[in-house]
Amino acid sequence: MSLEQMLVAMAAPLLAGGLHPNGAPQNGARPYGVYTNVVSPTHNTLSDGVPIQQDIVQIDVWADTYEGALTAGNTFAAAVQAAFEAGNLAGVQRSRRGRYDAETGLHGFTYEFSFWHP
């Protein structure tokens, strides 16, 4: 299963509108999320020189209210953290930023994660 497929599956029970690549369907259920692969530089490990991939993924969680976006976003981020701790994913949360989109009237939080995989 790809990283994106894992994230979408993790979000399914947590975000009523689902998690979508790069954009979400109009008039979908809220809260919902949108993910974007920001950059994927290849790195070598120090121990054996085998290349390891790092994906930096931005996930925006949107809802009608500030509290709704914060709650849904933090719940999703906690699920990702639990996957890190269980060894199902390797990575770290890098940041969280609040947002407001005046055009849609939606509140959002942007979460940035670094994921590592072979």
Image (tube, grey):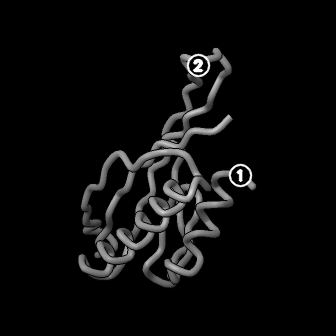
- Secondary structure of the residue carrying tag 2 is strand
Which is more N-terminal, label 2 or label 1? 1
Front-most of residues 18 and 10: 10
Residue 75, image x and y in percent? 40, 73
Judged left or right of residue 24, residue 61 is left
Mark 1: which amino acid?
A: Ser
Residue where numbered disc 2 is placed: 44
Residue 64 left/right relative to 43: left
Q: Residue 86: horizontal and vertical position, in percent? A: 55, 59
**73, above or below 64, in the image:** above
Q: Distance between the residues labelled 1 and 2?
A: 21 Å
| Residue drawn at x 39%, y 50% as measured from the top left | 93
Work out whether residue 103 or residue 115 is closer to the camera in this orientation and state it. Answer: 115
In the image, taking residue 112 as reference, residue 13 lies left or right, namely right
State the residue at coordinates (51%, 35%).
39
Classify mark 2: residues with Cα within 10 Å, few (<14), some (14-19) or many (20+).
few
Quadrant showing the C terminus:
top right
Task: Specify few, some or many for label 1: CA neighbours under 10 Å numbering under 14, 14-19, or 20 or more.
Answer: few
Residues at circles 1 and 2 in contact by the CB criterion of under 8 Å: no
Amino acid bearing label 2: Asn
Q: Quarter of the image holding residue 104?
A: bottom left
Q: Mark 1 points at which residue?
A: 2
